[in-house]
Amino acid sequence: MDIHRLARKITVTLFTAMSLGSAGFIVAATVNTIVGADISGNLAWAGLPAAFFTLGTAVSAFLLGFAMDRFGRRMGMVIGLVSGLFGTILAGVAIGVVSFPIFLAGMAFSGAARAALQLGRFAAAEVHPPEQQGRAISNVVIGGTVGAVLGPWLAGPMGQWAIGAGYSEMLGPYVASFVLIALATLLVFIFLRPDPQKLGKEVSRLHPESWSNGGQVRTFSQIIRIPAAAVAVAAMVLSQAVMVMLMGITALYMKQNNHELFGISMIISSHTFGMYAFSIFSGQLSDRWGRGPVILIGAVGLIFACLLAPVSPNLAPLAISLFLLGLGWNFCYVGGSSLLSDQLSPLERSRTQGINDLYIGLATGLGSFVSGLIFAAWGYGVVGLVGAALALIPFGMTLWWQVGQRRLATST
């Protein structure tokens, strides 16, 4: 068995599936709020579709973790992707029959596809030796760059296609989403072989030093008591909450300061560029310098971004701060994902990683909700201060863990 060749094949498959899937999510997300407000008849409910999508992602990550334990990574991802396809069909039907509850159900099912593809980063990690896992994770995460660039550009042409075919303009983006997710599903079903879980067990057998729990399958509560695992989960969950808090409210802040839509889209583009474009570097640094330093860099980036954003409503400082916000999230996300993978035996991976991504999804929803309350009550500056305070938690935990590691190394 040529493990290195198979690992490259699996990683390329997951990268391509992530690229297609993320483009599908983003082309639909471009019009989700518009459709939500239109078919509900209530502007206040425009944000509910995104909330249901996030909730669907969170719950699905948890369930798919168990499914992958039983059926393997490949079939677990296929189950999630097929659920997402069902969700896009429901969304299209909802537009036709003008039903807001059906549309929300479609958004929830669509979240399962996103959960499946996000869990793919761990599948890429487990088929590589420990010193290459950071790069493997980043190589999958960087697929989001393709979606961030391609997705929004598809919305307009697909809307025109729908009008030409005699349907609602809003149906077009969901047709594009269905096609892209369907392609990702076929790709995973056909090419994600051998199952990453099976290959990962062979990699772990060849590198027994990479995990040291003696083969015993631990519960999540036992794993989270390990300092490194706690640092990993905190880095991913809290960086997600910080990012969503500041990013989600910045567009409204800019609108209140009389920015045009073009300027707002430029800021969001700089943010998504920071989130994904440098993934390959964060993965390489994670393998070369270690997980801790990369998480520390990410946390510092988040803190600086949160403090810089409220300084001025002008485009340049906002672009820099939102870019740093995305970059800081990326370093925490890739470093944290790699560190969590380091702590798990083959039999613990899928379930534990699913629970971890459940918490990330819940952090996304809570961060979005809380940021609106804070912004309405105290303004954009306080949102930044709260975000910086939250980013201090993974920074302090990682620093504490790193100091403990060095003391342990010195004493031995």
Image: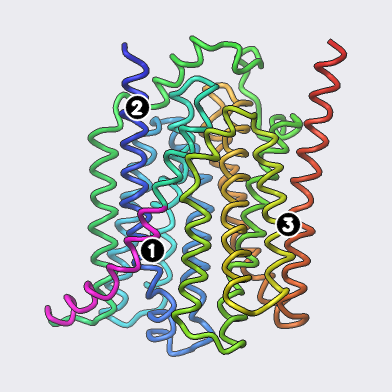
Please identify, in this view, whether the residue under mark 3 or under mark 2 is nearer the observer: 3
Please identify, in this view, whether the residue under mark 1 or under mark 2 is nearer the observer: 2
Other residues around mark 1 within 10 Å, as few (<14) / some (14–19) / many (≥20):
many
Q: Looking at the picture, which amino acid does disc 1 mark?
A: Ile
What residue sits right under mark 1 in the picture?
26
Sequence-earlier tag: 1 or 2: 2
Q: Quadrant of residue 248?
A: bottom right
What residue sits right under mark 3 in the picture?
303
Which of the labelled discs sits on residue 163, or is there none? none
Other residues around mark 3 within 10 Å, as few (<14) / some (14–19) / many (≥20):
many
What residue sits right under mark 2 in the picture?
8
Other residues around mark 2 within 10 Å, as few (<14) / some (14–19) / many (≥20):
some
Dots 1 and 3: beta carbons under 8 Å?
no
Specify whether 385 is left or right of 238.
right
Q: Along the line of sight, which residue is nearer the eye, 237 or 282?
A: 282
Q: How far, Cα to Cα, is label 1 from label 2?
A: 27 Å
Dots 1 and 2: beta carbons under 8 Å?
no
Q: How far, Cα to Cα, is label 3 from label 2?
A: 35 Å
Please identify, in this view, whether the residue under mark 1 or under mark 3 is nearer the observer: 3
Q: Looking at the picture, which amino acid does disc 3 mark?
A: Ile
Specify whether 5 is left or right of 220.
left
Q: Along the line of sight, which residue is nearer the eye, 3 or 181?
A: 3
**Residue in view at x 47 percent, y 41 percent:** 119
Q: Secondary structure at mark 3?
A: helix
* Image quarter of the N terminus: top left
Task: Report the span colored magenta.
Answer: 145-165
- Is 207 magenta? The answer is no
Q: Along the line of sight, which residue is nearer the eye, 369 or 13?
A: 13
